[in-house]
Amino acid sequence: MDQAHNKVYKESAKKVETKDHNTNPNGWLLELFKSQDGSKTEVYLSAALPGAFKGYHLHRVRAARYVCLKGRMKIITYEREGEQWIRSEKILDASVPERLFIPKDVATGLENIGGEEAWLINYPDPAYDPSLKEEQVEYTQKELESGVIK
């Protein structure tokens, strides 16, 4: 057997259906790249169904880096300023190659504003570590607009 062939292998990639706060399916998540020991997700793809919304949540430890590969996504962010959250919106469109950086502690929601499934690649920094149970904090839009801090 050729030695080079021993280095080529396939491995499973975890795919999870995602749901909104009302438990309605809104897309899926696919782990694209794991750390060598398999404990952390370094790159993943987040897919949203047409018209679907994913969020709001923030990460206490990690930043997000998004690139849209398919469709159009509105990225809604809330940044803390004094006693309130300040809302802003950015559009990522697969036809315009751009990256969006979102630092830690910024609440984020993703809305598919196109007519097809939309795909975002996320390269979290640091990599997603499932052992950090309190790292992701869920919010509702009402909580953010009311200035709630969790």
Image (tube, rainbow, N blue to C red):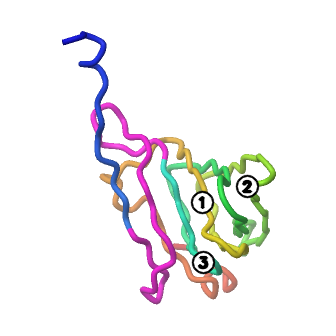
Alpha-carbon span between mark 3 and mark 2: 18 Å
Q: Residue at x 30, y 52 (%)?
A: 131
Q: Based on the picture, tell me whether residue 110 belongs to the magenta stretch.
A: no
Disc 3 marks which residue? Answer: 53
Residue 148 shown left or right of residue 34 in the figure? right
Alpha-carbon span between mark 2 and mark 1: 8 Å
Question: Residue extending furthest front?
Answer: 1
In the rendered structure, which disc, 3 or 2, sits on the residue that comes first in sequence?
3
Disc 1 marks which residue? Answer: 119
Q: Secondary structure at mark 1?
A: strand
Label 3 neighbourhood size at 10 Å, few (<14), some (14-19), many (20+)?
Answer: many
Instruction: Indicate which disc residue 94 carries.
Output: 2
Q: Residue at x 64, y 61 (%)?
A: 106
Label 1 neighbourhood size at 10 Å, few (<14), some (14-19), many (20+)?
Answer: many
Residue 84 shown left or right of residue 136 in the figure? right
Residue 126 at x, y percent in the picture: 49, 41
